[in-house]
Image (spheres, rainbow, N blue to C red):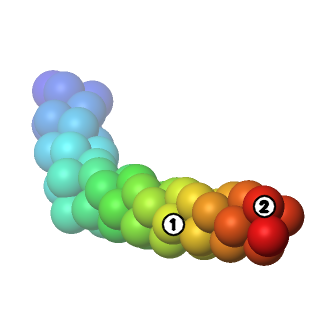
């Protein structure tokens, strides 16, 4: 009986840690990666356009 109670408590604690710490951390990392990717894409496009513009003159 004690093993079953400890198993249930362990599962509940694991779910608590998963939903309160791990998933928000992963969502935050994905948001950060998307923001950095968009900024890098904008910089790449700006450099590409300026490079083509200065080469054509």
Disc 2 is placed on an element classified as helix
Give whichever of 21, 32 is nearer the camera.
Answer: 32
Question: Which quadrant is home to the N terminus?
Answer: top left
Q: Which disc, if any, is residue 56? A: 2
Q: Quadrant of the C terminus?
A: bottom right
Q: Residues within 10 Å of mark 1 (few under 14, many from 20)?
A: few
Q: Is residue 30 left or right of residue 20?
A: right
Choose top left, top right, bottom left or bottom right for residue 17: bottom left
Q: Residue 18, position in %: x, y?
A: 28, 50
Name the residue: 27% across, 62% down: 24
Which residue of the protein is positioned furthest toward the right in this rendering?
55
Identify the residue shown where x is 84% and y is 64%.
55
Relative image position of residue 12 (x, y in whole percent): 16, 45
> Image quarter for residue 54?
bottom right
Local crowd at mark 2 within 10 Å, few (<14), some, or many (≥20)?
few
**Callout 1 secondary element:** helix
Q: Residue at x 42, y 67 (%)?
A: 35
Up-down relation of residue 10 to residue 19 (above or below) = above
- Return the x and y of residue 45 as percentages of the image width and height: 58, 60
Q: Nearer the viewer, residue 10 or 15?
A: 15
Does 54 sit above or below residue 29? below
Residue situated in front as seen by the camera: 49 or 28: 49
Residue 13 visible (yes or no): no
| Residue at screen point 63% across, 63% down | 49
Contact between labelled residues 1 and 2, with CB atoms less than 8 Å apart: no
Distance in Å between CA atoms under marks 2 and 1: 21 Å
Residue that numbered label 1 is attached to: 42
On the rendered structure, is 42 left or right of 44? left
């Amino acid at each position: 009986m004690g093993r079953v109670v400890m198993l249930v408590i362990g599962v509940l604690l694991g779910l608590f840690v998963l939903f309160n710490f791990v998933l928000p951390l992963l969502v935050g990392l994905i948001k950060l990666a998307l923001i950095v990717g968009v900024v890098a894409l904008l910089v790449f496009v700006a450099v590409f356009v300026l490079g083509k513009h200065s080469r054509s003159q």
